[in-house]
Image (spheres, rainbow, N blue to C red):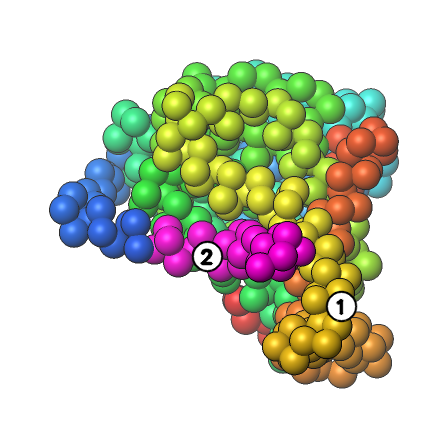
Amino acid sequence: MSILEISFWAFIFIIFYAYFGYGIILFAMVKIREMFIPERKIVNPKFEPTVSFIVPCYNERDILNDKVKNCLELDYPNDKLQIIFITDGSTDGSEDLLTQYREIEVLHESARKGKSAAENRSVNHASGEIIIFSDANTILPSDAVKSLVRHYINPVVGAVSGEKRILQSDRENAAGAGEGFYWKYESMLKRFDARLLTVVGAAGELFSFRKHLFKPLEEDTILDDFVLSLRITQAGYRVLYDPTATALETSSENSKEELKRKIRICAGGWQAMSRLGSLFNVFKHPVLTFQYVSHRVLRWTLAPLFLFLVIPMNILLAQDNVFYTIVLQLHLCFYIFGIAGYLLERREIKFKPFFIPYYFIMMNYAAIAGFFRYAKGGQSSAWERSARKVVPGNSPA
């Protein structure tokens, strides 16, 4: 076997492992471990610590009334729930609208320093033992707070993440169909990650943690929720995952908006890797390092690079070789499906079998573009509201 063949199959293996193989191994590890050590959930539904519920928002006036109403409907003792909205840098009058609600506190500064700076300030102002971050464009069930805080009866739990769900309509575009499918798979991985040891990066749509574990984030932090949750794991605590605490939001308005969001996330991933160095130390964090590299690092580094390198490699191997010619044909079919998904989206024609390959290709392109944006220092940490669909009659994905 030539070096080219060995490299080709090694690249294929890493791509498969990063997106599917890790999930298979993770599932097997959890099942085998729980055969010998059954999972013991330590929760107390009656445990009600003080909570500070914080909503960072930037120029989101048009959805704030709905978000405030949703927050006020949360089923938790009023004397133990502090609701804070922070609108730093907003220029659409968000703070004026919010001050009409006496039940909430509003923090506002005219300077736009970024989401991490705003969160640092809001946590410093918060009085609760447990901090909960929630995005302005998410809708939560009334029992969301109770679902999260019941886990904190266990002293080894440092943070608890809720489950993000994408609301989809019957006529969904490629961004919506792909994002919905992706988050279903991601949610499954997060559940098993948590059962093995800990969630590897919480979703900011609904994320809680013990206040005393918070360390101020660097103000240029791009992925605040990701870095914060992993620093809590570095400190020796577990980050759990509770799928009953759901955060519902609509999909990106279109693929352009979704690509913009993905590139920002991937640029933030490279920044996070540069700041979470100890997570690569397998001797210090054996299980966590395995989870971190398998679930996150490979998807931001080697997998997207190899995905595009195997195309020319396959072309070279297909010269006068029937087997590799068939492999190349299958390979090209995948990309043809992706191109078809792009074309169908432009014509507003729904066909999910083509949308998913298109989303997968777009996601890996975003990882490469995110690297170059991070390397050039071109990704701002200031949060930007992504355009989201407003679709009546949605159903959660």
Q: Does residue 5 show up magenta in the picture?
A: yes
Label 1 Cα neighbours within 10 Å, binned few <14 / some 14-19 / many ≥20: some
Residue 213, x across and y down, in percent? 45, 19
Q: Main secondary structure of the magenta part?
A: helix
Q: Identity of the amino acid at label 1? A: Ile
Above or below, 190 against 334 in this view is above
Which quadrant of the view contains residue 327?
bottom right
Q: Please give left or right for residue 111 compared with residue 23 in the image.
A: right
Q: In which quadrant of the rendered image does the N terminus lie?
A: bottom right
Q: Identity of the amino acid at label 2? A: Gly
Instruction: Identify the residue at image location x=58%, y=40%.
Output: 297
Q: Please give left or right for residue 73 compared with residue 367 in the image.
A: left
Instruction: Identify the residue at image location x=54%, y=71%.
Output: 395
Q: Of 246 and 279, which appears nearest the observer?
A: 279
Instruction: Identify the residue at image location x=61%, y=37%.
Output: 55
Residue 285, x across and y down, in percent? 40, 26
Cα separation, mark 2 vs mark 1, equals: 25 Å
- The tally of labels here is 2
Instruction: Identify the residue at image location x=77%, y=61%.
Output: 312
Q: Of 12 and 254, which appears nearest the observer?
A: 12
Above or below, 20 against 99 in this view is below
Q: Of 357 and 159, which appears nearest the observer?
A: 357
Circle 2 SS class: helix
Q: Nearer the viewer, mark 2 or mark 1?
A: 1
Task: In the rendered structure, find residue 21 and report the number of the disc placed on it.
Answer: 2
Task: In the rendered structure, find residue 286 and report the number of the disc placed on it.
Answer: none
2 and 1 marks in contact (CB < 8 Å): no
- Residue range highlighted in magenta: 1-27
> Is residue 90 visible in this depiction of the protein?
no
Determine which residue is flagged by label 1: 315
